[in-house]
Amino acid sequence: MRIAVDAMGGDFAPRTVIEGALAAADRLSIGITLVGPSDLVEREVHSFKKVRHLNIEIADAPDVIAMGESSLALRRKPRSSIGVAADLVARGEAAAMVTAGNTGAAVLAARMALGMLPGVDRPALATTIPTLGGRAVLLDSGANLECRPSNLVQFAAMGAVYARAILGIGAPRVALLSIGEEETKGTELTREAHRLLKAEREDFVGNLEARDLFSGKADVIVCEGITGNIALKVGEGLVDAVEKLLHRELHRSWAGRLGLRLAVRAFRGFRRRVDYSEYGGAPLLGVSGLCIVGHGRSSAKAIGNAVAMAHRLASGDLIEALAHDLTPTQVG
Amino acid sequence: MRIAVDAMGGDFAPRTVIEGALAAADRLSIGITLVGPSDLVEREVHSFKKVRHLNIEIADAPDVIAMGESSLALRRKPRSSIGVAADLVARGEAAAMVTAGNTGAAVLAARMALGMLPGVDRPALATTIPTLGGRAVLLDSGANLECRPSNLVQFAAMGAVYARAILGIGAPRVALLSIGEEETKGTELTREAHRLLKAEREDFVGNLEARDLFSGKADVIVCEGITGNIALKVGEGLVDAVEKLLHRELHRSWAGRLGLRLAVRAFRGFRRRVDYSEYGGAPLLGVSGLCIVGHGRSSAKAIGNAVAMAHRLASGDLIEALAHDLTPTQVG
């Protein structure tokens, strides 16, 4: 198996991305195609030791789309690393692509190169989150900032397939992230999406309040991309803040210092469960091929885990399962 | 001073609300007008001991608007507890109102009874949040689910006044909660709001990513009500989850059990800083009078703190300061 990695994507690219990709190639014994300006990528690869035995190829992509650029930059830069990586998947030269670059550009590149699965209008980023009971999948976590109610219904269908196939949840419960549990509460979008989900899905358990996101009351949580993205990032930021404040509080007292090492060790156990770098990235569901989008701040470890996720998803039959459950004739 | 308290508002009304209001009347030596069906409220009041010396009045309001009802129920129920409480403030018979009831109905009742300050189209709930550096104010945290860019500019002006007058921050930095730091990122709403804020406010420091909400990078954080509400509730839920998981992790090992009591004590210090019940509620800024909206799950302590907040704000000249800074002639 071969995975295409956008060597230029993310805040610490190319070095950190290449480091993580090389480590994954070694650990998983898979082929990696690094996509970026070939001179630069080649130089970086050779600065690492013990790379000769690895199955590494380089695909030249002289253009780079920066994190702050509009996704439309893809049209002006047909040979961007993100676009070339998507093309490799479309041509079957890679089983999946991984990028920690510009999310908007990744979504557009994947849509253009791979096309959409039948019955899906828009793709969604599916992020696995920890809950008190285990794990859940939140989508969309940022592929589409604004959505229509019918998009959320499609996200529910894709999320349910993902929860069964990847998270191993037999009968996933689907919920809609909203401002109150009552179906009369929320925006125009959530009220109409609630109505549609209730009518179309037996596994729909209603609205989920944001305070219950990590409670384990639902296995598949659907929302508009801006909402999902903000919910996840608030969570990330708060876990950081808790860690800092816990240190500070514990340092205040002599007794605290004694307990510090024990508490920090315990907290680390929890932190691992919310740390995106453990999951590596989120698959873009709904496109006709595998695309994993990593966090912009991905470390080498996070890139390695994103490649491992790509490998795992490509080894299964996720795309086939999605296509099977989403074909319009299945609805109703 | 006299504060009107909606005795029927919140998940644990009327008993818990009345308990908190009585305690605040005692502690602060102020008058409280409890608003609700008089028979019921009177019976509850007399079930508490040592109430005779307190300055308590009851304003009869036979109707109740339930948490799940549309705010339009106010029109069908002109003598609801939430509506009568707002009328008491409008008539000058109370210096402020406090409710932990239906937020939508509270916002509508306050707008109808009190009117808006000149130059403000919509009011905003201003929630104080803890940061690594101290405190910040987030608005709107749920008064308006959907907003226009110009609303966010008015929220910025109100938030800056609030941060100076109430949080004691000399030169507050104003930021816009969005999906990325770059001004090209975000929804149509946030992009246009960014443009307006940049043009109109010298204290605008740009977009704030949700992961930096608790970082202390801004003192006034503006956003649409649905976004603010979800951001805060994710925070609440995560702090709950951290506490449960910390307990669970610590119980796993013998060494953990030893450190448990120390760590939990330390965590409580942090938790107090994010616990809404410590702040009691959020003032509804932009209406021409004081209205404090508490959390639906308010405990007696939270109600007491909301009354204390009402007392503090009514003792200052917040409304005058807002009116002064917001009059349209001041702009530009």
Image (tube, coloured by chain):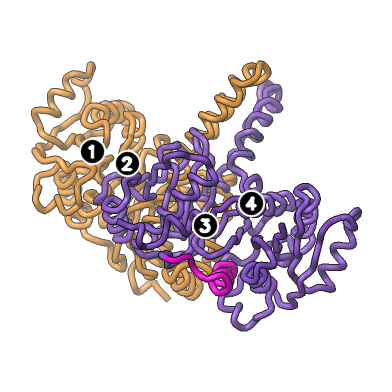
Chain colours: A purple, B orange
Query: Magenta region: which residues?
Result: A104-118
Q: Within 10 Å of the Cα at label 1, are there few (<14), some (14-19), or many (20+) other Cα atoms? A: many
Nearer to us: label 3 or label 2: 3
Nearer to us: label 4 or label 1: 4
Q: Chain of mark 3?
A: A
C-alpha separation, residue under disc 3 versus residue under disc 1: 51 Å
Answer with the quarter of the image where residue B96 lies.
top left
- Same subunit, tags 3 and 1: no
Q: Nearer the viewer, residue A319 or B50?
A: A319
Residue B171 appears in the figure:
no
Amino acid type, residue under disc 1 in the picture:
Gly
* Left or right side of A56 for B319: left
Answer with the quarter of the image where residue A256 lies.
top right
Residue where numbered disc 1 is placed:
B9
- Residue B321's disc is none
Q: Chain of mark 4?
A: A
Dot 2 or dot 1: first in sequence order is: 1
Q: Chain of mark 1?
A: B
Residue where numbered disc 4 is placed:
A315
In the image, residue B245 lies at what x, y percent?
A: 54, 30
Cβ atoms at labels 2 and 1 below 8 Å apart: yes
C-alpha separation, residue under disc 4 versus residue under disc 3: 12 Å
Amino acid type, residue under disc 3 in the picture:
Glu
Amino acid type, residue under disc 4 in the picture:
Ser
Quarter placement of the C terminus of chain B: bottom left
Give the secondary structure at mark 2. Answer: strand
* Left or right side of A197 for A319: right
* Left or right side of A132 for B10: left
In the image, residue A257 lies at what x, y percent?
A: 70, 25
- Residue B294's disc is 2
Cβ atoms at labels 4 and 2 below 8 Å apart: no
Please tell me which residue is depicted at 91% across the width and 54% down the height of the picture: A49
